Image (spheres, rainbow, N blue to C red):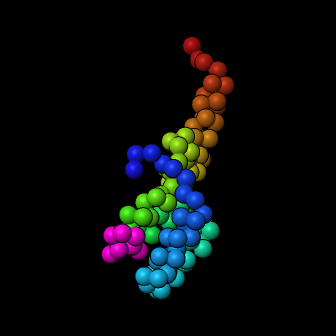
Amino acid sequence: MSKWEPVTFEESLCFVKKVKARDYVLYLSLLDVLSRNERIPLEAYSELSLLFQDHDDLLEELAKFRPLPAPSTVYSHSSIWLLLFLMPFLVLSLLWKCFLLQQPVES
């Protein structure tokens, strides 16, 4: 798949029905993953890929639903935490720099 194309509701419904007909436990697991609203789409897709790893045809069909990666300008969760962790150090260094700039220069 070189180009991403939107998937229709009918295609989504057909996929879910195919999973349900194949394996009811697999279907319930699919619904469980999809019902968790806090999931990031790529994380949910990765979890579903693991879920369908023994079902090559379903795994291939699942690829149609793969979400587009976020643009590089959007921060990931790890970069946000890193920024929050480093923020106090950044503020302290800026305050220190301002403090040094205000000191009179001795000759």
Total numbered labels placed on residues in the image: 0
**Is residue 40 at all visible to an observer of this figure?**
yes
Residue 49: name its quadrant.
Answer: bottom left
Asked if residue 7 lies left or right of residue 54, the reply is: right
**Is residue 79 at all visible to an observer of this figure?**
no
Q: Identify the residue at horizontal 48%, vertical 86% (top origin).
A: 24
Indicate the position of residue 28 as horizontal and vertical percent values.
52, 82
Establish if 48 lies above or below 103: below
Indicate the position of residue 82 as horizontal and vertical percent values.
52, 51
The stretch drawn in magenta includes residue 90: no
Indicate the position of residue 95 as horizontal and vertical percent values.
64, 36
Indicate the position of residue 63 as horizontal and vertical percent values.
43, 60
Q: Identify the residue at horizontal 53%, vertical 64% (top origin).
A: 11
Q: Identify the residue at horizontal 60%, vertical 74% (top origin).
A: 35
Give, as a single range, the part of the protein colored magenta: 51-58
Residue 61 or residue 66, whichever sits in front: 61
Asked if residue 56 lies left or right of residue 7, the reply is: left
